């Protein structure tokens, strides 16, 4: 089968794009990265993701795939080396469950915290804290990563929190919004993830994330074309 | 198949759309025998709380004692464990990605709950958004599922048909409650043709309640939710 071209449309300020890069690098897949200007979107970008107009978009052999979780499953199905998801249907279902939970309660939760203030924000912090406790409890049973000795799908999905939680603390008005010491298993997992060269060398610089959060704080919620996935 | 497995489905028909129905139809399409356990969401059973401690929601599929929650995840599990036809998802990875993408879109953008509960200006805004999103879906069907007929999965309903179907098939009830047409054959011809095919599929027809039943149910749900909100205030 001829090798088909792999292109990744991304943005340096999008944490979600990093997930795809981690997956592609983990599997040793060559790809062309294209930095998209979210303020002035290219034709290719608009054609590839007409529904949401967001990054990341993976284009494989000219065909676009959108939404980071959908892209991750696609990558795992096309390139089976260094499997991201478990083979067993039940274990796969469990991993998908936690990925959805993380997206919904943690990622979305953190964004809500950044976008709100006062009482609304305090409520958001409580919700994220509750989610962190639940995930922390799940992590008690893993030895190193959810994927075992190497990272897998769920580690990649949760991996964004590695930097994001720290940035949230720095950017927000209150200090120590999320005391990571109260989530021992989570903190241990975070250290292991941060230590991996694959992740360490492919994280947006803190100042870029910091800037993105600042942009989010000031620009939210109506300006669609600066929104990243 | 020689697979002596025990399948239990914890579900309810409370609220519309009902994700429980998605799973029921899938099990029936595959001919998988199951025990249905009706949950009273106002008084959840110990078993449900034990099987889905995180969300405490239905549906939950319990297969040989092992629980799986979230209807979309259950559907993928069903297709992966009981691999025989009819397949719920396509074999091709790119087609699978399209199916998953649109399932996410539906779950995010075509939720009727808020719409059913809304009033006045908020309702007008939500109606407009809903119709626009159906238009986006119409475009998506044209672009990504042009070879598939009469269902998005081809000859037999599949994952995406079921994710979409549990709300789409009750559209008449929702339209009656909000007092506006949401799905119009002149604006959404492909979608409308698809809804008709779904409503006429024997397994779907026997599992989903008839219009009157649906209407009553959605009305009761709205009433009960309002009561709950008023008692809390």
Image (tube, grey):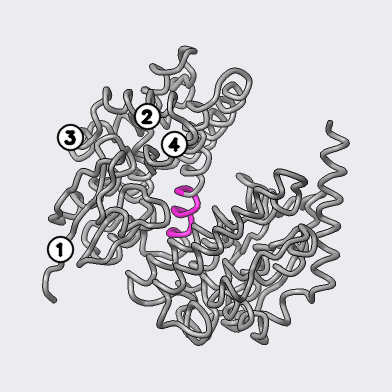
The Cα–Cα distance between marks 2 and 4, rounded to whole angstroms, is: 22 Å
Residue drawn at point x = 54 percent, y = 35 percent: A131
Pinpoint the chain carrying mark 4.
Answer: A
Q: Which residue corresponds to the image point at 84% horizontal and 31% vertical from the top-left? A: B233
Which chain does the residue under circle 3 lie in?
A
> In which quarter of the view is residue A186 placed?
top left
Dot 1 or dot 2: first in sequence order is 1
Question: Disc 1 on helix, strand or loop?
Answer: loop
Nearest-to-viewer mark from 1 and 2: 1
Q: Which residue is mark 2?
A: A164
Assess whether mark 3 and mark 2 are in contact (beta carbons under 8 angstroms).
no
Assign the N terminus of chain A to one quadrant of the image.
bottom left
**Between marks 3 and 4, how big is the CA–CA gap?**
31 Å
Is disc 4 placed on a helix, strand or loop? loop
Decide which of A62, A207 is in the foreground and name it. Answer: A62
Q: Which residues are drawn in magenta? A: A91-99
* Label disc, if present, on residue A5 of the rendered structure: 1
Question: Where on the picture, by quarter, is residue B162?
Answer: bottom right
Q: Position of residue A14 (x, y in %)?
A: 31, 38
Residue on which the image places disc 4? A223
Measuring 67% from the left and 87% from the top, which residue is drawn there? B202
Give the percent coordinates (x, y) of residue B166.
65, 68
Mark 2 and mark 3 lie on one chain; the one further toward the N terminus is 2
Residue occupied by mark 3: A201
């Amino acid at each position: 089968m001829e090798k088909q071209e792999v292109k990744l449309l991304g943005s340096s300020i999008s944490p979600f794009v990093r997930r795809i890069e981690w997956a592609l690098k983990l599997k040793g897949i060559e790809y062309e990265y294209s930095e998209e200007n979210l303020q002035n979107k290219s034709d290719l970008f608009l054609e590839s993701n007409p529904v949401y107009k967001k990054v990341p978009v993976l284009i494989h052999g000219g065909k676009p795939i959108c939404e980071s979780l959908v892209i991750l499953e696609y990558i795992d199905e096309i390139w089976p080396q260094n499997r991201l998801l478990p083979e067993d249907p039940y274990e796969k279902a469990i991993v998908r469950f936690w990925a959805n939970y993380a997206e919904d309660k943690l990622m979305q939760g953190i964004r809500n915290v950044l976008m709100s203030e006062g009482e609304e924000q305090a409520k958001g912090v409580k919700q994220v804290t509750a989610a962190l406790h639940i995930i922390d409890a799940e992590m008690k049973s893993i030895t190193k990563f959810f994927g075992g000795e190497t990272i897998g799908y769920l580690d990649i999905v949760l991996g964004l929190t590695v930097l994001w939680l720290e940035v949230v603390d720095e950017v927000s008005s209150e200090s120590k919004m999320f005391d990571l010491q109260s989530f021992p298993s989570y903190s241990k997992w975070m250290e292991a993830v941060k230590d991996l060269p694959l992740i360490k060398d492919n994280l947006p610089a803190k100042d870029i994330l910091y800037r993105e959060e600042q942009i989010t704080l000031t620009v939210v919620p109506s300006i669609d074309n600066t929104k990243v996935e | 198949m020689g697979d002596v497995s025990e399948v239990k489905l914890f579900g309810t028909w409370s609220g519309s759309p009902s994700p429980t129905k998605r799973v029921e139809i899938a099990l029936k399409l595959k001919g998988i025998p199951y025990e249905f356990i009706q949950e009273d969401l106002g008084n959840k059973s110990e078993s449900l709380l034990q099987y889905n401690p995180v969300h405490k929601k239905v549906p939950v599929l319990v297969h040989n004692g092992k629980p799986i929650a979230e209807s979309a995840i259950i559907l993928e599990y069903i297709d992966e464990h009981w691999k025989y036809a009819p397949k719920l998802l396509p074999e091709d990875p790119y087609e699978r990605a399209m199916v998953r993408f649109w399932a996410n879109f539906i779950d995010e953008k075509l939720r009727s709950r808020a719409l059913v509960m809304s009033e006045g200006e908020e309702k007008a805004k939500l109606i407009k958004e809903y119709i626009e999103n159906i238009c986006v879906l119409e475009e998506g069907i044209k672009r990504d599922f042009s070879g598939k007929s009469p269902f998005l999965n081809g000859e037999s309903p599949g994952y995406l048909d079921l994710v979409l179907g549990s709300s789409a098939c009750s559209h008449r009830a929702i339209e009656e409650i909000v007092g506006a047409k949401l799905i119009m054959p002149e604006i959404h011809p492909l979608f409308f043709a698809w809804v008709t095919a779904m409503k006429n599929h024997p397994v779907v027809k026997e599992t989903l309640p008839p219009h009157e039943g649906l209407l009553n149910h959605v009305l009761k749900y709205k009433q009960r939710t309002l009561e709950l909100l008023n008692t809390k205030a």
